[in-house]
Amino acid sequence: MAGNIRVVAFDLDDTLAVSKSQIDDRMAKLLAQLLGKVDVCIISGGRFEQFDTQVLRHLELDGEARDHLHLMPTCGTRYYRWIEGGWGQVYAEDLSTAAKEHVVTVLVEGAKALGLWEAEPWGDIIEDRGSQITFSALGQKAPVQAKYEWDPDGRKKAALRDYAAERLPELEVRSGGSTSVDVTKKGVDKAYGMGKLIERLGLAKEDVLFVGDRLDEGGNDYPVKAMGIRCVAVSRWQDTAEYVEHLLPSLPYGPSGDV
């Protein structure tokens, strides 16, 4: 299986790190080792700034390794590469102002109708990420444990997702992290991001391996599985670390680079 892997892609929260937290030193070292063998992509619902806080500041990488790191914030609606000494944006599938206003109205109305609107959240409940509007039930700065306890079976998120999807048929509405619902342009999701990466590197789906914690149908990692990419399901970053430790010795190639 590992013989033809040229790219390993990861979700971020609960795959590489605890939700909204920096990666552990063990995971940082494993990512650095992996970048010596293959291209690595991180694709998740947060902004680029979240990627920087959680991952980039804690990686010790040389210029060559950075060249083989691909960052796809907001579920693949944006793409960043190391370009001329800094992280540069390759593309952004931004929503129009009118679309964003409509999405916010629907999410707020839906949360209140379903009894999911928190009177005293930890930070903003609605966040405009340019190419994605994100609803975070407890607020953007909610404690990790509170987030995990809010909706353990996913029913609350599913109810809001269904409410919003019915009223936003022209857009993509997905369950995000443990307390979030994400809205993007139609058809622009993690599968879209993976497709763009495969095209840019001149590879095939068979060359890519994806690791994520929400590969169940309805989860924001599921589109990658549905497009036929090999996937590994995890539930916490320690699972990912153990998998990468076993994967590394079986990877014979150096990074693929741009073709």
Image (cartoon, grey):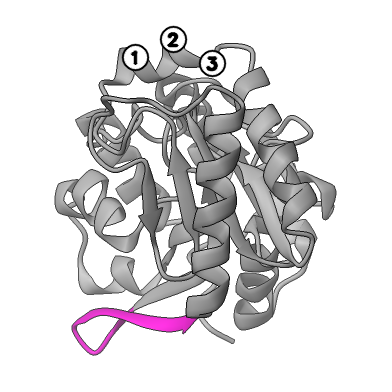
Mark 1 lies on a secondary structure that is helix
Q: Quadrant of the C terminus?
A: bottom right
Residue 27, quarter of picture? top left
Give x and y (percent) for residue 214: 63, 32
On the rendered structure, is 247 left or right of 224? left
Which residue sits at x=58%, y=24%?
234
Q: In this view, does 88 lie above or below 125?
A: below
Spatial separation of the CA atoms under disc 2 and disc 1: 5 Å
Q: Name the residue under label 2.
A: 149
Q: Tell me whether circle 2 and circle 1 mark residues in contact (CB < 8 Å).
A: yes
The secondary structure that most of the magenta stretch takes on is strand
Badge 2: how crowded within 10 Å, few (<14), some, or many (20+)? few
Q: In which quarter of the image is the N terminus?
A: top right
Q: Mark 3 points at which residue?
A: 151
Q: Name the residue under label 1.
A: 146
Question: Which residues, given as a range, are shown in magenta?
Answer: 82-92
Front residue of this view, candidates 120 and 223:
120
